[in-house]
Amino acid sequence: MATKKKKRTKLVCEVCKRSTYFTNKTKAVEEKLELLKFCKYCKKRTKHKEAKR
Ligand SMILES: [Zn+2]
């Protein structure tokens, strides 16, 4: 049996450039590369982008 590919995507805060979240890549995420997430370093909601692997 072939192993399922699970892409783990790192989300990086655009403000502080730190990776704050990991997410399992889905088709929905692939289309939407920018997510508004709460950054614990900036202590506010910032844009998060998918980090390049
Ligand atoms: Zn941040």
Image (cartoon, rainbow, N blue to C red):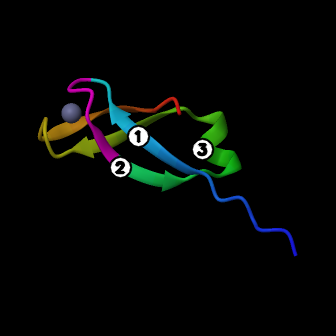
Counting from the top left corner in percent of width and height, residue 8 is at 54, 52
Please, what is the three-letter code of the amino acid marked with disc 2? Tyr
Image quadrant where one finds the N terminus: bottom right
Earlier sequence position, callout 1 versus callout 2:
1
Q: Secondary structure at mark 1?
A: strand
Frontmost of labels 2 and 3 is 2
Q: Residues within 10 Å of mark 2 (few under 14, many from 20)?
A: some
Q: Secondary structure at mark 2?
A: strand
Q: Residues within 10 Å of mark 1 (few under 14, many from 20)?
A: many
Which segment is the magenta one? 15-20
Earlier sequence position, callout 2 versus callout 3:
2
Callout 1–callout 2 Cβ contact below 8 Å: yes
Please, what is the three-letter code of the amino acid marked with disc 3? Val
Between marks 2 and 3, how big is the CA–CA gap? 13 Å
Q: What label sits on residue 50 in the rendered view?
A: none
Counting from the top left corner in percent of width and height, residue 48 is at 38, 34
Seen in the image, is 11 located left or right of residue 4?
Answer: left
Counting from the top left corner in percent of width and height, residue 5 is at 71, 59
Q: Which residue is mark 2?
A: 21
Q: Secondary structure at mark 3?
A: helix
Q: Residue furthest top?
A: 15
Callout 2–callout 3 Cβ contact below 8 Å: no
Q: What label sits on residue 11 in the rendered view?
A: 1
Picture residue at 65% right of the left edge, 52% below the top = 26
Assign the magenta stretch its main secondary structure: loop
